[in-house]
Image (cartoon, helix red, strand yellow):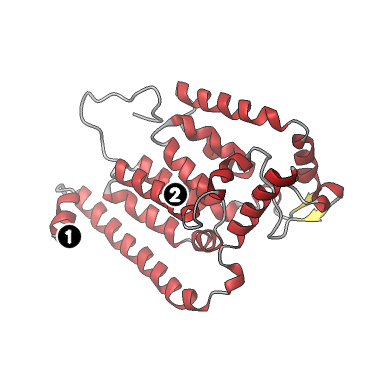
Amino acid sequence: MAMDRLRHLVRSDPRGRLIDLVALTLTAVFLGLLVADLVPLLPNLDPAKIAVDYHLYIEATRRFFTDGTYYVPSQIAGPYPTDPGVILYPPPFVLVVAPFLALPWIFWWAVPIGIVVAVVAYHRPRVAAWPFMAACLWFPGTTVMVVAGNPTMLFVAGVALATVWAVFGPLVLFKPSLFPFAFIGIRRQAWWLGLAVLVLVSVPFGAMWLDYVKVLANARQPLGLFYNFAQVPTMLLPVAAWLGRSQRAPGQRPRWWMAAP
């Protein structure tokens, strides 16, 4: 059954067939490399590194709703190294994390991963796009992100949603170091609606924005704005599915809220 499905997906013309067969081979190679990396890694994971970012942001958000503090005093007082364990997200990011305070921990992973899987299935990317997605999965930064429960998973999901509903595009602006991904769907009216909502929910945080400016100004990171470059391949996974999507039926026009035809 699986082989019949693959034969159906591979194009029949000689050039397309060759491209698709090469793509399938590369996909298998990247997925094989991923498995080869995970088999020795998972049994030897340091327990202290599992879900470390999840606990960091859940506790910081809970602290915000308890006493109003989000950033630690040392971030505001003066220069500090951007080691793991510091928060560099803008104040409104607490609104993104807040729902997870009331949900079991597994939802922190299940929600973004489920969204990405659903969007990829929706786009039905052509075989030629599969190796690009497989490479994004194999990239070590993806494994680190998932194991640590890094919030970037939520932004990968946001990018995935933006490829279908442009209104979610501006959500990525909550992670300024990856801001180019926020422009997906910018030509749609819904993108600007999303930006307006983002501005509205940001206004009530008032003076906390001054703290955020100090947090960024005091941060000391050798790579500067490129310190999150290792997360770019994972962010590209839904983009690869979107750019490699199957053609829509003739005459099917995109709605105003969609990112692309």
Q: Quadrant of residue 166?
A: top left
The residue identified by callout 2 is 111
Three-letter code for the amino acid on which mark 1 is drawn: Ala
Label 1 or label 2, whichever lies nearer to me, is 2
In the visual, does 5 lie left or right of 220? left
In the visual, does 103 lie left or right of 17? right
The residue shown at (47%, 57%) is: 106
The residue shown at (63%, 52%) is: 57
In front: 251, or 39? 39
The kind of secondary structure element at disc 1 is: helix
Label 1 crowd bin: few (<14), some (14–19), many (20+), radius 10 Å? few
Instruction: Return the x and y of residue 7 as percentages of the image width and height.
Output: 15, 55
In front: 108, or 38? 108
Instruction: Return the x and y of residue 1 as percentages of the image width and height.
Output: 13, 60
In front: 110, or 113? 110
In front: 134, or 160? 160
Three-letter code for the amino acid on which mark 2 is drawn: Val
In the visual, does 133 lie left or right of 62? left
Q: Give the mark nearest the N terminus, 1 or 2.
A: 1
Dots 1, 2 in contact, CB < 8 A: no
Instruction: Return the x and y of residue 236 as percentages of the image width and height.
Output: 46, 48
The residue identified by callout 1 is 2
Disc 1 to disc 2, C-alpha distance:
28 Å
Q: Quadrant of the C terminus?
A: top left
The residue shown at (80%, 50%) is: 75
